C-alpha cells in the first residue's frame, strides 16, 4: 500500500477560496509554542511540567536510524516547526501524563460545513495513547474524533481530514485539542492545523478497476517482511478522476456480499491509481485473502469537500500461496541473520527438515521439524563463519546463506 503524496499541495489549492477560521503551523518568530493555545497536564495524571513542546528538523525518533527527516516527506506533509508531546524524553522519572494542547476558540457562526485538517505522526508503544477532541461549549465537554489507543501498533502518520460540522454546529466558542496520555512511552506530533469551510466539490468517482470487473483466477501473492512475517496480498488498482476537484486520498472496501454489507476489509488512505499497489491481508491460510473466493469491492475518492464511491466491482481469487497446494518455497525465511546462537525458521506451512553446510560443502548439522522447538534451530555448537541452510518443505527446498557470529 502506498501513501498519498499530493495532499499538501492540494490542500493549498482548497484553502485558496476557503473560509479559514483557525490556522496554526507553529512558524512564529520565536521558537516557542503559541501562547494563545492551552498547554496543561490534566489532573489527576501528574506533574504539571509534562507539557507539549516545539520541535523542528523532521526527525521521527526511533522510527529508524537517526537522524532522519521522515516528518518532512510528502506522505507526512510537515515542514519547519511542529508541536510534540515526547513522553520518552521525559523519562521514567517524569511520571504519568495526560497532556492536552488546546486551540484558542474559533467561531463557526454562519458556516454550513466545518472541516478540521492536520498533519501528524504517532509512534505506538509502552501504553502511550493519543486523542483528538472537539468542543462546542468553550471546553466544558469534549467529543472524540480520533483515537490511537494502546491496541495500536507501529506508526500512524496519515494526514487527517475530519468533518466536525455535526459537533460544532454554529458555535462561536469551539475548540480542538490534541491530547497524549502515557508514562515513559513514545510521542505524538502535530502540524499544519486548519479549521475551515472549504470551497469546491467532492471528487469524481474512480474508474477502470484492476483486476477487471468479474475477473477470475486473480493471484494471491506472498510477501515476506523484514521480520520474516509472510503476508498475503492482492494487487488492486483503479484510475483516479482527472476532472473536477481532485481526490486527496482513497479508501478501498471489500466484502463477500454483492451489496458490500458486512465488509471484511477496509484499506484507508489507499492509493490504487499507480501500478503494483496491493491490499495486504492475512498471514496464514485461514486468515485474510481466501482461495477461490469471490470478493466485491469499491473505491472511495475523498477530498476535503466530501467523498464519492465508485461502482461495485468483483473478482475471484486463485489458489492461496500459503496453502499446501499453492505453497511458495520463497515464502520461507530465517531470522536473525547474522545469528549468535538460535535462528528462527519462518515458514507459513511448516517444513520437513533443515541441513546446515559449511563453506566446504560439508554437512555439519541436520534436523527435522519434529526435533525443532517452535521453529528455532540451535546453532551454538558451530564455529563463527558463513553457512548455508537448506530448508526442505513439500518436496521443495530453499537454500539460505547465514552468518554465524
Image (cartoon, rainbow, N blue to C red):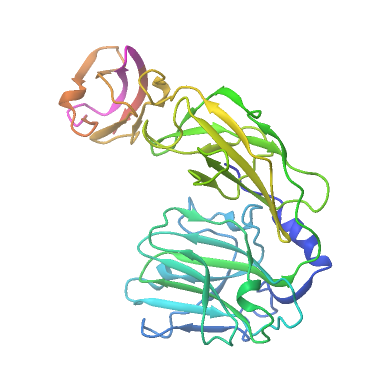
- Is residue 138 placed above or below 393 in the rendered structure? below
User: Quadrant where the N terminus lies?
Assistant: top right
Q: Position of residue 309 (x, y in %)?
A: 68, 48
Left or right of 8 in this view: 270 = left
Q: Report the front residue among 101 and 357.
A: 101
Q: Position of residue 404 (x, y in %)?
A: 29, 30
Q: Quadrant of residue 94?
A: bottom left
User: Quadrant where the C terminus lies?
Assistant: top left
Question: Which residue is at 39% across, 85% downward?
Answer: 43
Question: Which residue is at 45% across, 22% downward?
Answer: 319
Q: Report the front residue among 102 and 306.
A: 306
- Is residue 110 placed above or below 80 in the rendered structure? below
Question: Which residue is at 47% across, 68% downward?
Answer: 130
Q: Is residue 389 magenta?
A: yes
Question: Which residue is at 69% across, 81% downward?
Answer: 170
Q: Position of residue 394 (x, y in %)?
A: 32, 15
Q: Position of residue 274 (x, y in %)?
A: 68, 37
Q: What is the count of numbered marks? A: 0
Q: Is residue 399 magenta?
A: no
Left or right of 381 in this view: 220 = right
Write the start and end of the magenta stretch as one range: 379-397
Q: Quadrant of residue 153?
A: bottom left
Q: Report the front residue among 215 and 402.
A: 215
Left or right of 99 in this view: 19 = right
Q: Report the front residue among 204 and 294.
A: 294
Amino acid at each position: 500500500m502506498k501513501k498519498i503524496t499530493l495532499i499538501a499541495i492540494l490542500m493549498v489549492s482548497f484553502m485558496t477560496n476557503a473560509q479559514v477560521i483557525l490556522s496554526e503551523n507553529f512558524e512564529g518568530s520565536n521558537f516557542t509554542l503559541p501562547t494563545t493555545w492551552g498547554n496543561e497536564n490534566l489532573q489527576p495524571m501528574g506533574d504539571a511540567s509534562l507539557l507539549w513542546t516545539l520541535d523542528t528538523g523532521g526527525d521521527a525518533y526511533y522510527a529508524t536510524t537517526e537522524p532522519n527527516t521522515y516528518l518532512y516527506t510528502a506522505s507526512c506533509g510537515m515542514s519547519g516547526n511542529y508541536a510534540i508531546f515526547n513522553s520518552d524524553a521525559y523519562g521514567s522519572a517524569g511520571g504519568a501524563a495526560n497532556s492536552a494542547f488546546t486551540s484558542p476558540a474559533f467561531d463557526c457562526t454562519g458556516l454550513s460545513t466545518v472541516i478540521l485538517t492536520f498533519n501528524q505522526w504517532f509512534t505506538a508503544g509502552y501504553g502511550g495513547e493519543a486523542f483528538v477532541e472537539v468542543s462546542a461549549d468553550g471546553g466544558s465537554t469534549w467529543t472524540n474524533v480520533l483515537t490511537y489507543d494502546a491496541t495500536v501498533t507501529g506508526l500512524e502518520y496519515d494526514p487527517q481530514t475530519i468533518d466536525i460540522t455535526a459537533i460544532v454546529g454554529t458555535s462561536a466558542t469551539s475548540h480542538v485539542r490534541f491530547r497524549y496520555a502515557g508514562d515513559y512511552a513514545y510521542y505524538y506530533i502535530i502540524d499544519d492545523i486548519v479549521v475551515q469551510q472549504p470551497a469546491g466539490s467532492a471528487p469524481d468517482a474512480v474508474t477502470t478497476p484492476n483486476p477487471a470487473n468479474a475477473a477470475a483466477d486473480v493471484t494471491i501473492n506472498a510477501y515476506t517482511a523484514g521480520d520474516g512475517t509472510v503476508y498475503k496480498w492482492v494487487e488492486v488498482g483503479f484510475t483516479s478522476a482527472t476532472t473536477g476537484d481532485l481526490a486527496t486520498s482513497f479508501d478501498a472496501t471489500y466484502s463477500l456480499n454483492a451489496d458490500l454489507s458486512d465488509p471484511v476489509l477496509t484499506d484507508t488512505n489507499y492509493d490504487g491509481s499507480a501500478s503494483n499497489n496491493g491490499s495486504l491481508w492475512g498471514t496464514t491460510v485461514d486468515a485474510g485473502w481466501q482461495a477461490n473466493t469471490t470478493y466485491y469491492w469499491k473505491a472511495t475518492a475523498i477530498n476535503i469537500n466530501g467523498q464519492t464511491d465508485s461502482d461495485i466491482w468483483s473478482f475471484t481469487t486463485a489458489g492461496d500461496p500459503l496453502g499446501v497446494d499453492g505453497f511458495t518455497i520463497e515464502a520461507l525465511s530465517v531470522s536473525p541473520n547474522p545469528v549468535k546462537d538460535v535462528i528462527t525458521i519462518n515458514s507459513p506451512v511448516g517444513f520437513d527438515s533443515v541441513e546446515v553446510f559449511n563453506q566446504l560443502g560439508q554437512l555439519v548439522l541436520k534436523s527435522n521439524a519434529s526435533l525443532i522447538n517452535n521453529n528455532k534451530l540451535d546453532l551454538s555448537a558451530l564455529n563463527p563463519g558463513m553457512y548455508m541452510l537448506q530448508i526442505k518443505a513439500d518436496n521443495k527446498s530453499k537454500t539460505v546463506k547465514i552468518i554465524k557470529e
